[in-house]
Image (tube, rainbow, N blue to C red):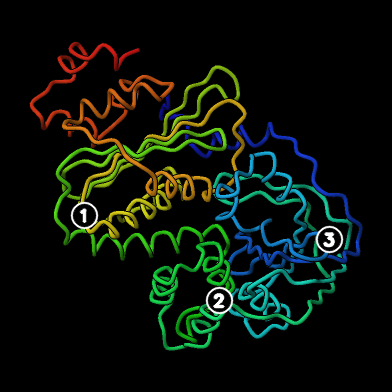
Amino acid sequence: MRTSKTTKNAYLEKLTEKIKMNSVDVGKDLDGSTPPSVFIGRWSYPKVYAGPMMVPQLGDTYIMDSPEQWIANNKSQEDIITYRMNLVRGKQLIDIKDLENPFVEKLQDISLASKSIDSEATFGSKPVGASFNEEITPHGPSAIIEKFDIDAVRWDKQLEKSFYDTDLKAREAVMNLHNKDVPFSAMQKAFSVGAFGLKKNRRLVPTRWSITACDSTIADNLLKEVRHYDIMDSYRVYEFSSLKNYYAIILTPTEWQYEWFEAFIKILGKEEMIFSDYETNTDKTEYSCVGGCYYTAKMAVLDKLAKLKLQSGVIILREAYSGYVPLGVFNVRENIKYAMNGDYKEFESLKEALVYCGTKLQLPISKYVKQSNLLKELLHSKQTTLDSFFKKSPDLQQ
């Protein structure tokens, strides 16, 4: 179980240190394509290492940086890692406000592109290394880029419209694009290269921050809408499994409240780590202690509630199992989207919903309840003490 001495970041650092992946071997000159893909680092902010990510092959490489297509096309964890380890990151140190820099203009071209772009690069040294992180999708070797050229680019029409509207606030641009079903990864990349917002406010945004900014912008807007809807009249459980993860999403017949749990089970050894965070029906002001997955899960569920025109509480239980590799928050977003678009099971009580989830989870429900805030409250609010609850429900303790 999680203790105050073990943070999620510390655990994932230990996990990613153990992962050894072979990234693509390239020299100082690279002739290939960009899926399209860019990466903006966060170290040394407000100067950042920004640049394209390229693949040493020509033609259509779009799927290599299109997370929305991976689960839909039944791509395995190994497939995704292979895609990502073939992406070579070029970088230059650039001030976040230097958007008229010709190199940055090429990055904007890439981020607004509707398809892969053939490109050429010369690096200052042979690209080396690889990057693994729970927040952002992995990539292969990197190096300072000295020369970079791309073929003519055709922009996505919706992204282009937002780029040229310099009187439109960034959050409004993000919501417009979301409502027009522009893929999240496409709008996030454009957001990161300063393609949206009032002209005076545009700047480069580190990739990691831009993902959470887009997720939280969409979630906050959807929550304002969902709070006006009638409350759901039963308990529902949505679920989905892929990429060494299982997700159970419990919707409760209450006003909006949200608790997120994620368990990492026997990935490094015999550990069973649970991390969690929650919010009541007030706006959360501090950054979540569990990172970007909290916001992306919230956004995916609220998107479904807005379409249903219903309000509910939300409890999400995620388990990651042996063989799991951190692939970025897309893993959470896309899994939950698939869960919410699938069939659900309906229950008359929270107890029944939890008993059902207990048949699918590896950890007993009692461990989640012990760490919870909202789940405990929901159980108590039904005039059920935890002791009597578990006494009457031995199947939750197995």
What is the distance, in whole Å, between disc 1 and disc 2 at their CAs? 35 Å
Residue nearest the observer in this picture, 287 or 165: 165
Residue 111, percent from left and from top: 62, 72
For image coordinates 21% across by 48% down, the residue present is 312
The amino acid on which the numbered mark 2 sits, given as a three-letter code, is Gly
Locate residue 33, reporting x and y percent.
78, 66
Q: Quadrant of the C terminus?
A: top left
> Secondary structure beneath disc 3?
loop
Give the crowd class for mark 1: few <14, some 14-19, many >=20 residues within 10 Å: many
The correct choice, above or below, for 204 with respect to 137 in the image is below
Q: In this rendering, would 51 be left or right of 196?
A: right
Residue for badge 3: 57
The residues tagged by marks 2 and 3 sit, at their Cα atoms, a distance apart of 28 Å
- Residue 94's image quarter? bottom right
Residue at the disc numbered 1: 310
Q: Give the number of the disc on residue 194.
A: 2
Indicate the secondary structure of the residue bearing disc 2: loop
Residue 231 lies left or right of residue 304; in this view the side is: left
Percent x, y of residue 207: 58, 61
- How many marks do you count on the picture? 3
Q: Residues under labels 1 and 3: Cα distance?
A: 47 Å
Q: Amino acid at mark 3?
A: Gln
For the residue carrying disc 3, how many other residues have a C-alpha within 10 Å: few (<14), some (14-19), or many (20+)? some
